[in-house]
Amino acid sequence: MSSSSMSSSSKSTASNFENPPPPPTSLDLWSQIVAEENQHYDNQIDIVFRRRKPRNDPNNVNSKNSHDIPRRPSRVSFADPIKRVSWKRSLSTRGRTSIAVGASLVYRPELKKDRRKGKPPTHPKGNNAKPANFDKERLYFQEVDAFELMEESPSPKKVGSWIAGNVTDDVPLPSICSRLEKWLHARRLNPRSGPSSTLSKILDTPTMKLETIYDRNDSDFRLRSLDRSEMEFETIYDLDHSSSDFRLRSMDQSELSNSQLQNLKTRETRSSNDAILIRSESCEDIEAGVKKLSLTSTSSSFDDHNNSFAVLLETCGQSAPSMLEDLFSRYSGSETVVKVGEGTYGEAFKVGNCVCKIVPFDGDFRVNGEVQKRSVELLEEVFLSQTLNQLRGSDGVSNNLCRTFIESIEFRVCQGLYDADLIRAWEDWDRKHNSENDHPKEFPEQQCYMVFVQQHGGKDLESFVLLNIDEARTLLVQVAAGLAVAESAFEFEHRDLHWGNILVSRSDDSATLQFTLDGKNLLVETYGLIISIIDFTLSRISTGGSILFLDLSSDPDLFKGPKGDKQSETYRRMKAVTEDWWEGSFPKTNVLWLVYLVDILLTKKSFERTSKDERDLRSLKKRLDKYASAKEAILDPFFTNMFVESDMA
Ligand SMILES: Nc1ncnc2c1ncn2[C@@H]1O[C@H](COP(=O)(O)OP(=O)(O)OP(=O)(O)O)[C@@H](O)[C@H]1O
């Protein structure tokens, strides 16, 4: 990273704090608390760098063309000096984490250095970070809760200082009084105030309808304390879907693999005999939900972790993790498994007609130089993918439909070793492409994986060879129309639409593709190309009940990429547009990625084109600047000329 890019980035950060975003008007107290928390956490934060490596793909003819600009320099990770890493995404500070959960979660503090929202950390990086001090932290949260108890008890009117401006003084506060509870209460009254929370999302999300109970003595649910001897094979999260309540049952040891048993034993021992039950039930009373989650009383951070793990399992329709081998054999048939790509977190394998993206999670060691994702983060990615799946229309008639977002076929929690076929596929790919990821044979037997089974979307744009301007144009129109549809349906913003996240495949099946935008149909020419958008890690979406987003303000390095590099400039432009308030809806970010895409086509991809084609692309880029959303952009003549048919005015 050049020092000039560093300084420009820090300048932009400073100005953002001088001019805070307007919408969350009542966050003063919140900011104070976060600031105080950050002080307490400063010593625990560690920066690692999320990599998007430049590929040395010998088949990538584009890398040899005259339009190429030099690859951005890689830099060395603090975590593993052998690995190349890029400036991109130091998502060790991944923000799609609940404030509420984050405040209590310290179950692996040596790894999770900065899980809270707020200002970028100013602490020492990497190995210089000091070890966590849990006593201080415990004391701090006790103080915070004690303070709020005092504040609430005498007069509910004091809530005015906490809740956003449109909340009246006569709203009674719930008797429960942790920071989390009060925040959730405020959020219910004013859903747009304050940062969002995974936990509240789980409680709020209408599609999930779940309730979590930590009551080991509640006879209604036939739960009881398990004694030590039973803990050998207890609490396997076996959720009996045949009854209205899911019931926990003991599973026989023979039903589980050794690794599953060991892992579950470990989890349960950590939970100190608390049984966890998940019921499929609407959660109408947020306070009741909060009470039951009870983050402040008896439950430990391990409970929270186990809770999201259990919810993740339930969301995937599982009672216990599967073996990778079993999952893959369901899809592969007689075909061999082939690795098709890798990302910072995921390894993608083609199996039959699908791609399985395997993401290790919840382990307490780094993978590919990164802190592993946690159950709760995967849960949100699953929600997000499920929501985007709805655009495919399988849930019935809708006003907004498209097939541009990769289809998620199944989500599966797995555990155990990579089997021989997967190892072979991984090593084959490594020989050809020189993998930058850790060899999966190093992973322990207890390692958990989230497997996203997806439609095979083809090759990413970085390595795909475009033949002519028609292919470039259909690519642009499909991306723009897809974004417009998702924007309209779910206020969706991708926020990371670089050329590794756009997949391209050739197909003679469909000369045209239909999009439905606000009830109006439009048909676009494909010229034999089908585009699929992947990787929703940074995306923002509104599911109706909740907003899922990644708080990039806690990831300052994302904005420190090389000056002049189109991708890093796009992150910086997004930051300027959002004013670092990532929860907000800013469809302009989609337009910024369209601009990036035009730039990429002009400067990094070679295909048959005339100078008029280049002029057209350049003037499109100029016009894009004035559009506030993909929905506006799609009405540009560059795109409408590609419509074969359209109901749109
Ligand atoms: N459905 C798919 N079809 C075909 N290839 C895919 C698919 N999903 C992923 N890939 C390949 O795997 C690569 C990595 O996938 P992806 O970007 O989703 O992983 P990631 O770990 O989330 O990456 P990132 O580093 O951006 O976080 C992609 O660039 C692509 O080449």
Image (cartoon, rainbow, N blue to C red):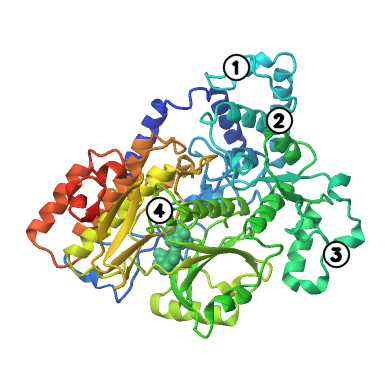
Q: Earlier in the sequence, mark 1 or mark 2?
A: 1
Label number found at residue 88: 4
Residue plotted at (61% across, 70% down): 443
Locate the C terminus and report the quarter of the image it occupies.
top left
Depth check, mark 3 against mark 4: the one in front is: 3
**Distance between mark 1 and mark 2 Cα atoms:** 17 Å
Q: Residue furthest left?
A: 611
Q: Secondary structure at mark 2?
A: loop
Mark 4: C-beta under 8 Å from nearest atom of ligand 1 = yes
Residue farthest to the bottom? 334
Classify mark 4: residues with Cα within 10 Å, few (<14), some (14-19) or many (20+). Answer: many
Q: Earlier in the sequence, mark 1 or mark 4?
A: 4
Under mark 2, the amino acid is Ser
| C-alpha span from label 3 to label 2 | 34 Å
Provide the residue designation for mark 1.
Answer: 160
**Residue behind mark 3:** 232
Res 584 quadrant in image: top left
* Disc 2/disc 4 C-alpha distance (Å): 37 Å
On screen, residue 554 versus residue 171, left or right, reads: left
Asked whether residue 51 appears in the rendered view, the answer is no
- Residue at image position (82%, 49%) is 274
Q: Which residue was labeled with disc 2?
A: 178
Of badges 2 and 4, the one in the foreground is 2
Task: Looking at the picture, tell me which residue is in the foreground, 46 or 180.
Answer: 180
Foreground mark, 1 or 4, reads 1
Label 1 sits on what residue type? Gly
Using the image, determine if residue 107 lies above or below residue 504. above
Marks 1 and 2: which is nearer the front? Answer: 1
